[in-house]
Image: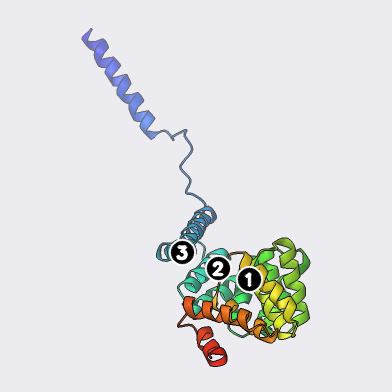
Amino acid sequence: MKSKLLYMLAVGGLVSMLSACAPDPRPAFEAWPAQQRAQTQIELGFSYLQRDQLDVARESFRTALKVDPKSSEAYHGLGLVEAKAVNLKQARSYLKRSVELDGQNISAVSDYAIMLCQEGNGKTGVEVLEKNVKLPFEAGIATKLAFGRCYQADNQTNKAIVAYKEVLALDPKLPQALLSMAHLKYDSKNYLSASAFLQRYFYTNTLSSDALLLAAHVEHALNNPEERNYYTQQLWSRYPRSEEAKKARELYSQ
């Protein structure tokens, strides 16, 4: 009995040793692909950005770039983070890099162009859009809005109006397009049309110092002093320290 037990133990030990030396039939663990890891960080970054958690969003996009240094989406996200943080020079640099890496990242192209045009570089903004957006009539609403903004900044009024009309055909209540159309109509001295676009803008429950000052200008041009005074009072009450309020005081104070 004793010898049989020793034999069984010896055999068992040999089997254990062989099992330890044999290759594991289970597949080896494979690291998560770099592209997927980067994309996860990018998606997290945009999620944090939407919630205005800028520091966390910035870190997520930077982590994505450590994994994929040529990620256009990550640079785009960083550009939007810095734009929200009012670090405009850095934002412009990130957005430019995003477009350089992938000219078909149309969201980045649109945001970069709008930033250029808001800073007064209308011609460059138009060039960025026309170079990268091959079929502008098939573009989404954000890209059409970018075309409108940049044509307006570059004093291409007719093209700007066409672009904004395309935007409003898709979203008749988009405040940015309505206010821009009001400005264009006022500049062309079509005051009744400017007033109509402003009313549509106010009906969206949107308000800004720019819109109130423009409304005062329009009513003044239409010789409606009571309406003009209503808008100036609203401007002074809601935005007392704004540049628009200062201009209204210079022009319309009794």
Residue nearest the viewer, comparing 116 with 231: 231
- Distance, label 3 to label 2, CA atoms, is 15 Å
> Please, what is the three-letter code of the amino acid marked with disc 2?
His
- Of marks 3 and 1, the one in the foreground: 1
Select label 1 or label 2 by which is in front.
1
Mark 1 falls on what kind of element? Answer: helix
Disc sitting over residue 66 in the figure: 3
Front residue of this view, candidates 216 and 148: 216
Picture quarter containing residue 140? bottom right
Mark carried by residue 76: 2
Residue at point 49%, 81% (across, down):
236
Asked whether the beta carbons under mark 3 and mark 1 sit within 8 Å of each other, the answer is no
Label drawn at residue 90: none
Dot 3: element? helix
Q: Name the secondary structure under disc 2.
A: helix
Q: Specify which label sits upstream in the sequence, 3 or 1.
A: 3
Could you tell me the amino acid type at mark 3? Lys
Residue to which mark 1 is pinned: 176
Residue 220 pos. (x, y %): 65, 85
Q: Residue furthest left?
A: 2
Provide residue 50's location: percent of width, then percent of height: 50, 60
The percent coordinates of residue 244 (x first, y second) are: 53, 84
Examine the rendering and report whether any part of residue 105 can be seen: no
Q: Are there few (<14), some (14-19), or many (20+) residues within 10 Å of tag 3?
A: few
